[in-house]
């Protein structure tokens, strides 16, 4: 069976730490059950343990297909049965005893909270819950009694099927279309066709996919049924809109017989512009050297802003006042995306400046690119290529010139930030890249794009105008 390089666990950002298990609630339509069982398979395949359940109903066929099933009768936790099932299979579906026609009833929210409380004792890395129903339709709005979210929920995942895009807002396509129309501000009698913008709004609306979201929960929408180029293009429009709002999301095709079930992860990423050095070898502040009519720091910051980075953090050190003054006009027009942070101990080396940049990032940022100020030929297109590799699943991305991996500009997923914080001295992220060389995604680039300015000779030899940013 073919699997995707990007797992659903990684795309959702699960910690998978049995000491503090993830409690994931799936809501909406278009693939909740596929997501439920996919997470169970991935966690078990990784050598960890998962408990699966629902607070609504599952079909008898779905229940029968689970690797292991334990039923709860009342409030007493079947600890021995759960332990045995998890030891044998790594995952276990936990259901109630009631059967209602073709469906089996799940647990109450209180029973799920009891399971969550015992999960660390059972060495469970994640508890995954299907928290509402959709009558097999790809889109829905929750009724007054939905979703049934346990208090222990840490991650709320609204799910929708991209197959609904372009279809009419009608009962054959959408569960509770009258509620969807109310949330979207549409006239139901006009039966409008659903657009990417409609899904983007509905899935993160407090009366829609984000209903029940509380402090301490994360929200990660999942766009499923993305099986064609047209649907992928539409899903990317939606995900880009969410990323601009600081929301992580997942694009998937769960339930296909084979293939890359998780297509892409999206989320806000940032550029940290390293502009703290003293330029001792050059003899003059390189940050202020003119390039195509503007100071180098402004040119590189403008490049970073021209990418789809959610934020650009400029780390200053030596010549801080002059650098800030040079950037002031650009900062005034950047609509809050350009942030400057001063690192007073810049003379101790790159590591401290890198960490000052990390500390200044907005909390929602999922990945960061470190970009030196003395690479004026770097293009926004190259930065976007780094981000595309991250969306496809790479945790580390770096340029490669003639078979040699370069340390900058390089992208680091949030999972690698603890390692970056341990770096000391006059070195940057290259230390982490070398320690994880086998997992670095490499982008072949022209050496001219990465030319830097360290000496007067470098300045004289610097390439001319920037290449077209295609």
Image (spheres, helix red, strand yellow):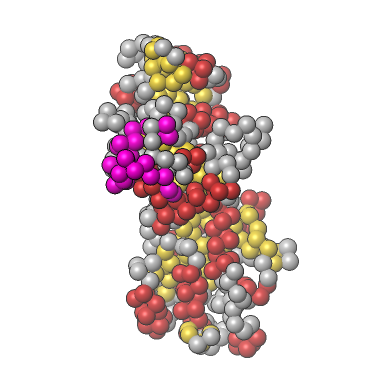
Q: Position of residue 57 (x, y in %)?
A: 40, 21
- Residue at x 42%, y 67% (from the top left corner): 313
The answer to if 190 sits in the magenta stretch is yes
Say left or right for 434 vs 374: right
The answer to if 301 sits in the magenta stretch is no
Instruction: Specify the quadrant of the image occupied by residue 407.
Output: bottom right
- Residue at x 38%, y 44% (from the top left corner): 192
- Residue at x 41%, y 12% (from the top left corner): 101
View extreme (left): residue: 144
The C terminus sits in image quarter:
bottom right
Q: Position of residue 303 (x, y in %)?
A: 50, 72
- Residue at x 59%, y 30% (from the top left corner): 45
Return the residue nearer the eye: 350 or 287. Answer: 287
Determine if residue 216 is in view.
no
Say left or right for 54 vs 45: left
Range of magenta residues: 172-196
Return the residue nearer the eye: 78 or 55. Answer: 55
């Amino acid at each position: 069976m073919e699997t995707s390089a990007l797992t659903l666990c990684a795309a959702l950002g699960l910690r998978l730490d049995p000491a503090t298990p993830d409690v994931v609630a799936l809501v909406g339509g278009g693939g909740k059950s596929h997501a439920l069982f996919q997470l169970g398979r991935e966690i078990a395949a990784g050598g960890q343990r998962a408990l699966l359940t629902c607070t609504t109903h599952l079909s008898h066929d779905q229940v029968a297909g689970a690797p292991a099933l334990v039923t709860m009768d009342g409030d007493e936790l079947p600890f021995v049965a759960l332990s045995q099932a998890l030891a044998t299979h790594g995952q276990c579906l936990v259901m109630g005893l009631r059967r209602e026609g073709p469906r089996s009833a799940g647990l109450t929210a209180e029973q799920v909270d009891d399971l969550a409380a015992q999960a660390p004792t059972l060495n469970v890395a994640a508890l995954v819950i299907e928290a509402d129903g959709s009558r097999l339709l790809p889109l829905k709005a929750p009724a007054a009694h939905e979703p049934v979210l346990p208090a222990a929920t840490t991650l709320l995942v609204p799910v929708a099927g991209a197959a609904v895009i372009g279809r009419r807002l009608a009962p054959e396509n959408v569960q509770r279309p009258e509620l969807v129309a109310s949330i979207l501000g549409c006239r139901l009698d006009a039966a409008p066709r659903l657009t990417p913008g409609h899904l983007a709004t509905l899935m993160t609306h407090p009366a829609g996919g984000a209903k029940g979201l509380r402090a301490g929960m994360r929200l990660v929408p999942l766009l499923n049924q993305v099986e064609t180029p047209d649907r992928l293009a539409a899903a990317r429009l939606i995900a880009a809109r969410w990323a601009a709002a600081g929301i992580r999301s997942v694009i998937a095709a769960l339930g296909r017989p084979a293939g890359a079930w998780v297509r892409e992860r999206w989320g806000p990423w940032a550029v940290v512009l390293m502009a703290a050095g003293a330029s001792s070898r050059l003899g003059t502040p390189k940050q202020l050297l003119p390039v195509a009519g503007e100071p180098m720091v402004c040119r590189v910051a403008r490049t970073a802003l021209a990418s789809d980075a959610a934020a650009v953090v400029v780390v200053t050190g030596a010549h801080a006042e002059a650098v800030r003054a040079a950037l002031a006009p650009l900062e005034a027009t950047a609509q809050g995306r350009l942030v400057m942070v001063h690192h007073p101990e810049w003379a101790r080396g790159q590591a401290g400046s890198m960490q000052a940049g990390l500390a200044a990032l907005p909390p929602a940022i999922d990945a960061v690119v470190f970009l030196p100020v003395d690479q004026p030929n770097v293009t926004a297109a190259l930065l976007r290529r780094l981000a595309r590799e991250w969306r496809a699943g790479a945790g580390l991305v770096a340029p490669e010139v003639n078979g040699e991996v370069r340390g900058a500009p390089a992208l680091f997923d949030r999972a690698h930030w603890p390692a970056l914080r341990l770096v000391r001295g006059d070195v940057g992220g290259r230390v982490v890249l070398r320690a994880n060389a086998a997992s670095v995604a490499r982008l072949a680039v022209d050496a001219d794009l990465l030319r830097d300015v360290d000496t007067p000779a470098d300045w004289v030899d610097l390439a001319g105008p920037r290449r077209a940013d295609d």
